[in-house]
Amino acid sequence: MSLGLLCTIVLTGALVRLTGSGLGCSDWPNCNSQKFVDVSSGHAAIEQINRLFTGCVSAAVIVAVLTSYLRRPRRRDLVLLSWGLVAGVVAQIIIGAVVVVTGLNPYANMTHFLVSMFLVACAFMLERSSRIDSVSRVVRAVPREIRILHLLLVTAASISVVTGTVVTATGPHAGDEDAVRFGFALVSVARVHSISVIATVGILVVTMLRLRSATDTVSRSVRQALGTMAFVAVLQGAVGYLQYFTGVPVLLVGFHIAGATAFWLTVCNLFFAPRPDEVLPSA
């Protein structure tokens, strides 16, 4: 439940920015100096819905903490992961306040999104780890010959997500027409982001080729994760280029943000695959 809600709130946050509702509420935690909740205008209503949705996420995180303590036998890893969600949500609330107080500062907005990705990763690990009784390691087992490629791929994919936030903080759709933007040339930062994406796809292709003839269980599992990642990466790249060459329309930007979240889930799937003690592979 936490994972689904955390992915959803990324999209509601994007809705706030893409509709120019980033300052629909001019204060925090109140919507404005007169009202805690104000839906008198469209922008205020959209911003308020996103804020109130944070309450649903907080409730889900509290449930995650409680269930991690109630589970028998109690597991330290699940307790720590659930508290990681608490820390992340608290950080998001503080960052959200900074975003409003600073008039949608691009650094604060970038941090807001990247902390969301941390929370998604944390919730992903929690969901996967909770499926088995005892976890020995959370990092996916990979064949020896692709261990370096595996780490390079996850690193390159993470960099592509970060560079994508720089493009977002430079381009239009800041959440308000008067919001401060980075002073970079959009073409330049888009090119840097594109290079990071191409590097990621290149490493992905090389890794898949190295495993094309492997038939063992571990290789088949990794190959499946790579295939999912490749599918999402191709779709995300297509949307990215389409939005760039069509003047960054709102609808395509929305799809691109949803795609970025989906792509990050495939990165988590490639890197995190909790293994029970009794089935720990030797590879």
Image: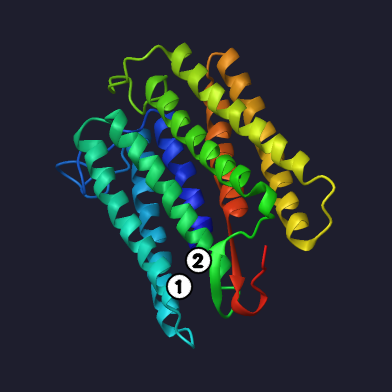
Q: Which residue is rendered at x = 45% and y = 36% of the image?
A: 15
In-image side of 120 versus 128 (left or right): left
Give the residue at x 48% y 84%: 71
Side of 149 where 112 appears, left or right = left
Neighbour tally class for label 2: few under 14, some 14-19, many 20 plus, Cα within 10 Å: many
Q: Are marks 1 and 2 in contact (CB under 8 Å)?
A: yes
Q: Amino acid type of disc 2?
A: Leu
Q: Quadrant of the C terminus?
A: bottom right
Protein image colouring: rainbow
Residue on which disc 1 sits: 78
Q: Is residue 111 left or right of residue 5?
A: left
Q: Residue at coordinates 69% horizontally, 55% vertically from top-left?
A: 143
- On the image, the x and y values in percent for residue 158 come to 50, 40
Q: Where 221 sits versus 234, above or below?
A: below
Note whether 210 is above or below 79 in the view shown.
Answer: above
**Between marks 1 and 2, how big is the CA–CA gap?**
6 Å
Give the residue type that dot 1 points to.
Answer: Leu
Q: Position of residue 140 (x, y in %)?
A: 61, 59
The answer, for residue 169, to whether it is visible in the render is: yes
Residue 45 appearing in the image: no
| Residue 47 location (% of width, % of height) | 35, 40
Q: Secondary structure at mark 1?
A: helix
Report how many numbered discs are placed on residues in the image: 2
In this orientation, which residue lies closer to the viewer: 83 or 96?
83
Q: Can you tell which quarter of the image residue 113 is in?
A: top left
In depth, the one of 187 and 34 nearer the eye is 187
Local packing at callout 1 (Cα closer than 10 Å; few below 14, some 14-19, many 20+) is: many
Say which element carries label 2: helix
Residue under pointer 2: 126
Q: Return the residue nearer the eye: 2 or 213.
A: 213
In the image, 277 versus 20, the foreground residue is 277
